[in-house]
């Protein structure tokens, strides 16, 4: 989903200030949602005139009775999401906030689409001292409730929400509807592992400004909210402490995500500790730690759970009598556990704790013939099983020059741990972002030198989101990358398929010829690309059925870069 921001303004009886506020915001050419929280008749007339003046840019919503600032903001956020916007910049109607800072908020959100962008007030002499010092009491409580200083100011009404995160929260949790809303939504978003960024912004209090802050009752509400949140923090204490070593999400746009935008989960420290444990105590003891780790990620990784269920649903619908795993928590746990074990085995292989006896060819004839010829080749694999196992063994035994072509910016922490386990790891690792001319020339040199270039055909490089070819996969249409076949055509070399699956007696290698040479005639290029992609998809489907828990694409694989969700999802 492309980045689509808008502005949400809650208003209650600010008829004298709202005109200037709208005028200062309109110059930024963003759609504006004004939510009238049951204002008086005079304010309604002003808003109706503004709606006519800014027709096409301003949407006016009206709540029949005054429900409070929180109620108005939530109504605005829901309306913005229903109109297919991805982000909403909340700003107060009274003109306190500096509208010239709007582009800074928008650019910060564009850079980190999953982060909540908060205004950090810079006050001038107009700020009432009681309000200024009183805010710090709330700040301290928020820092306690989150066990963090991340939320620098929880009361500033100038902030930008990713709508998917915010609306999922307000639709699942009963949030307060008055002035305490601004505080509680941030704390609960933090508990849900949202990332936060702060932007300094000037705040001015007009001498004749209208404030709806009720010194008695709003302070009572805020105190009651803090009491609720402190008890909530205590109940979440183990998870909050665990989160201290885990990255927070700051990339996701919402429901539809490109795989490369999904943040790598897991900390470098945690991965390094597993590596150290493997070295000191061995594979069998260290593998026991995978179960609680996977349980944690199962509970906190809703997106991965949903992707797993989506995959198993397609697998089952494509073969209703095939005895495939049923979507659910158990299959998601086994799926994630297989992924963790695969990563653990990669670490063990690069650490020299896996030998050739643990890995066997189903039929070695094709690989032996290629190795004997001394020719280079393009080998297409997938995020199925464990391709890295073979590269590690090849490096140990010097059997063949195997270079992995990878999109490593998505998994830098894990790759750095593998590199620390064996200095050979990075020597034959080629990082790419696309399959352009420069990449093809670099690969041609390696193929001419007799190397085997291993790439995957079940993901699209970050810069090639539009270069896909549709193929039938597990009963539905899915987008497959054109890159492997375009690259094979440019290299003019033999092409093989390769899968490494974990079976009862160890890992089994499946190495099969795919094409002696891939030709792409200019006039029939699209048809030939579609045919090769379909042939690859059919073989991938075959091996997915053979090892259903070992396909590790934890994102909506059937979502088209151009159309959104596709197939039966």
Image: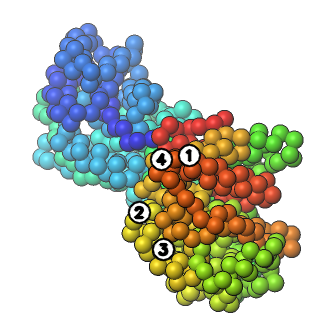
Q: What label does residue 443 carry, if any?
A: 3
Dot placed on the residue nearer the N-terminal end, 3 or 4: 3
Q: Which of the two residues, 195 or 329, is positioned nearer the viewer here?
A: 329
Dot placed on the residue nearer the N-terminal end, 3 or 1: 3
10 Å crowding of disc 1: few (<14), some (14-19), many (20+): few
Query: Which callout, 3 or 1, points to the residue nearer the camera?
Result: 1
| Label 2 SS | loop
10 Å crowding of disc 4: few (<14), some (14-19), many (20+): few
Mark 3–mark 2 contact, CB under 8 Å?
A: no
Q: What label does residue 523 carry, if any?
A: 4
10 Å crowding of disc 2: few (<14), some (14-19), many (20+): some
Query: Which callout, 4 or 2, points to the residue nearer the camera?
Result: 4
Which residue is under mark 2?
A: 436
Residue placed at 14% from the left, 47% from the top?
124
Horizontal arrangement in the rendering, residue 508 relative to residue 146 (left or right):
right
Residue placed at 40% from the left, 48% from the top?
113
The image position of residue 440, as x and y in percent, is 45, 69
Residue 502 occupies which quadrant of the picture?
A: bottom right
Which residue is under mark 1?
A: 527
């Amino acid at each position: 989903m492309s980045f689509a921001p808008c502005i949400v303004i809650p208003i209650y009886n600010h008829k004298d200030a709202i005109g200037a506020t709208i005028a200062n915001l309109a110059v930024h050419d963003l759609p504006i949602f004004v939510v009238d929280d049951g204002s008086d008749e005079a304010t309604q007339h002003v808003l109706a005139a503004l709606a006519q003046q800014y027709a096409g840019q301003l949407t006016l919503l009206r709540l029949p009775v005054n429900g409070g600032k929180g109620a108005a903001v939530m109504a605005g956020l829901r309306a913005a999401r229903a109109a297919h916007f991805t982000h909403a910049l909340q700003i107060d109607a009274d003109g306190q906030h500096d509208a010239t800072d709007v582009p800074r908020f928008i650019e910060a959100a564009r850079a980190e689409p999953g982060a909540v962008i908060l205004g950090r007030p810079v006050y001038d002499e107009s700020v009432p001292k009681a309000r200024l010092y009183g805010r710090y009491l709330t700040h301290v409580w928020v820092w306690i409730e989150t066990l963090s200083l991340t939320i620098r100011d929880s009361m500033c009404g100038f902030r930008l929400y990713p709508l998917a995160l915010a609306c999922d929260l307000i639709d699942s949790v009963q949030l307060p509807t008055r002035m305490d809303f601004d505080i509680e939504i941030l704390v609960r978003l933090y508990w849900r592992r949202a990332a936060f960024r702060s932007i300094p912004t000037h705040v001015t209090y007009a001498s004749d400004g209208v404030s709806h802050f009720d010194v008695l009752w709003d302070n009572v509400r805020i105190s009651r909210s803090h009491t609720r949140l402190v008890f909530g923090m205590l109940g979440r204490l183990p998870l909050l402490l665990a989160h201290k070593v885990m990255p927070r999400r700051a990339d996701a746009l919402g429901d539809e995500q490109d795989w490369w935008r999904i943040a790598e989960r897991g900390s470098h420290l945690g991965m390094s500790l597993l590596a150290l444990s493997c070295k000191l105590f061995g594979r069998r003891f260290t593998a026991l730690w995978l179960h609680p780790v996977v349980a944690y990620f199962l509970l906190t990784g809703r997106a991965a759970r949903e992707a797993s269920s989506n995959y198993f649903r397609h697998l089952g619908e494509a073969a209703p009598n095939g005895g495939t795993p049923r979507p659910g928590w158990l299959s998601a746990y086994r799926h994630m556990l297989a992924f963790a074990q695969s990563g653990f085995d990669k670490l063990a292989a690069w650490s020299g704790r896996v030998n050739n006896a643990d890995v066997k060819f189903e039929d070695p004839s094709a690989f032996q013939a290629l190795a004997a010829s001394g020719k280079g080749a393009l080998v297409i694999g997938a995020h199925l099983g464990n391709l890295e196992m073979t590269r590690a063994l090849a490096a140990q035994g010097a059997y063949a020059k195997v270079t992995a072509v990878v999109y490593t910016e998505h998994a830098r922490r894990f790759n750095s741990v593998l590199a620390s386990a064996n200095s050979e790891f990075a020597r034959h690792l080629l990082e790419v972002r696309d399959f352009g001319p420069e990449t093809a020339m670099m690969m041609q040199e390696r193929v001419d030198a007799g190397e085997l270039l291993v790439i995957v055909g079940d993901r699209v490089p970050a810069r090639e989101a539009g270069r896909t070819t549709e193929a039938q996969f597990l009963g539905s249409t899915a987008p497959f990358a054109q890159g492997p076949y375009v690259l094979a055509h440019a290299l003019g070399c033999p092409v093989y398929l390769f899968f490494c699956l974990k079976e009862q007696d160890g890992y089994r290698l499946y190495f099969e010829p795919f094409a002696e040479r891939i030709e792409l005639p200019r006039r029939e290029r699209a048809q030939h690309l579609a045919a090769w992609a379909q042939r690859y998809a059919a073989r991938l489907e075959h091996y997915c059925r053979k090892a259903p828990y070992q396909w590790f694409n934890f994102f909506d694989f059937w979502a088209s870069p151009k159309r959104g969700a596709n197939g039966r999802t």
